[in-house]
Amino acid sequence: MTMTIESQDGLAIVVLTGRLDSTNAADTEAKIVAQIEAGHKRVVVDASALDYLSSAGLRVFLVVAKRVKAAGGGLVLHSLTNHVREVFEISGFINVLTVCANRDEAVARV
């Protein structure tokens, strides 16, 4: 998996590509949490190129959501692929986390 992070005015936009699973979940979580600790209280995750999401990947989003909420900010995901959306729906995370159709909507909601 590859991850790029764009930051601007307290907002971190995280673009995930490939597979988010147990082999890279801890590193991904640490890098996003580091953004929160650096003062980015609003996090937008672009999942348009995220092909696979395991339960370890779901945990990343849960931890990040809790950390950013504790910092007084928010987390919004957008452009979920069909597989990732299915994982979110089956797990119930679709009702727990904010998911938007595209980046503009996600930035406006966070």
Image (cartoon, helix red, strand yellow):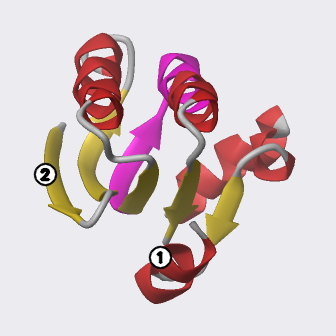
Q: Which residue is mark 1?
A: 107
The image quadrant that residue 70 belongs to is top right
Tell me what residue is drawn at x 37 percent, y 12 percent: 22
Q: Amino acid at mark 2?
A: Thr
Q: Is residue 49 left or right of residue 101?
A: left
Q: Check disc 1 and report its element: helix, strand or loop.
A: helix
Q: Amino acid at mark 1?
A: Val
Give the class, few, some or many, for how many residues have Cα within 10 Å of label 1's Cα (few <14, many ≥20): many
- Answer above or below: position of 37 versus 87: above
Q: Is residue 13 left or right of residue 6?
A: right
Q: Sequence-wise, which precedes: disc 1 or disc 2?
A: 2
Q: Name the mark on residue 4.
A: 2
- Answer above or below: position of 97 versus 11: above
In front here: 21 or 67? 67
In front here: 38 or 30? 38
Q: Is residue 78 left or right of residue 66?
A: left
Residue 58 is one of the magenta-drawn residues = yes
- Quadrant occupied by the N terminus: top left
Q: Check disc 2 and report its element: helix, strand or loop.
A: strand
Q: Which residues are magenta?
A: 48-62
Residue 3 is one of the magenta-drawn residues = no
